[in-house]
Amino acid sequence: MSLFITFEGEEGSGKSSQAEELYKWLSTQDIPVILTHEPGGTELGERISDLVKWAQGTDISPTTELMLFNASRAQLVREVIRPALGEGKAVICDRFDDSTTTYQSYGRELDLETVKKINTTATGGLRPDLTVLLDLSIEDGLARKSGEKLDRFEQEDIEFHRKVREGYLKLANEEPERWLVIDALQPREVISQVIRERVSTLLPA
Ligand code: TMP
């Protein structure tokens, strides 16, 4: 078996907690599974992540962002994801190339086709079997983040986040068989259950 599941959503959507919940649940089902994340997930990727999320005093251009996220991704795919899938493991990744399509193309307004081509170069064409989108309004998402130290993306204005959210919903609409869109304001356990039910349909009998 090899199964590749990604989690997407905006700041404060709870996707990281749900990715972890799913990891724990699959482990209890004796499914060999790993949990990783973007940006980062490798030693090199973590250094890139630090740069792109927290660089202060440098005006990082949208194209530079596109390349940095994809540099981190190319390393993660080669070092972690492909080997795990090759060993028959399930791989859960907290963010993948849909994040670049939404943040760098819909959000930063880079050309969509160019972004998709560069993403594909980084992933080598690897596509998730399932992508879980935890959707919530921008206001609710940012409210959940208030009080925390904000990275470069969390500091963006409401309009940027609105474009990102619309981007996600558009992508999900274009490929409904791959995406599972969930209202992120539901109770945590309800969300976990919906995800488990869908993932169960992808597991060997
Ligand atoms: P996170 O670690 O809180 O998920 O933060 C990662 C931030 O980087 C988040 O605001 C989304 C952004 N991001 C992009 O803009 N493009 C990407 O390709 C990825 C993976 C993340």
Image (cartoon, rainbow, N blue to C red):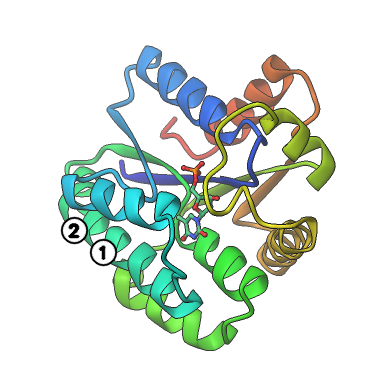
Give the residue number, with chain letter if any, for mark 2: 78
User: Which quadrant is home to the N terminus?
Assistant: top left
The quadrant where residue 31 appears: top left
Image point (28%, 66%), residue name? 71
Q: Report the front residue among 6 and 148.
A: 148
Q: Report the front residue among 134 and 66.
A: 66
* Label number found at residue 168: none
Report, in whole angstroms, how far the alpha carbon at label 2 lies from the one at label 1. 6 Å
Q: Is residue 201 left or right of residue 74?
A: right
Q: How many other residues sit within 10 Å of disc 2, few (<14), some (14-19) or many (≥20)?
A: some
Q: Is residue 125 left or right of residue 129?
A: left
Image point (72%, 57%), residue name? 161
Image point (17%, 45%), residue name? 43
The quadrant where residue 26 appears: top left
CB within 8 Å, label 2 to label 1:
yes
Instruction: Say whether residue 200 is visible.
Output: yes
In terms of secondary structure, where does tag 1 sit? Answer: helix
Residue 121 at x, y percent in the picture: 32, 77
Mark 1 sits near ligand 1, with its Cβ under 8 Å away = no
The quadrant where residue 41 appears: top left
In terms of secondary structure, where does tag 2 sit? Answer: helix
Give the residue number, with chain letter if any, for mark 1: 74
Q: Is residue 113 left or right of residue 36?
A: right
Q: Amino acid at mark 1?
A: Ala
Q: Is residue 198 left or right of residue 115?
A: right
Picture layout, residue 75 above or below residue 143: below
Q: Amino acid at mark 2?
A: Arg
Instruction: Say whether residue 183 is visible.
Output: no
Picture layout, residue 30 above or below residue 112: above
Residue 154 at x, y percent in the picture: 61, 47
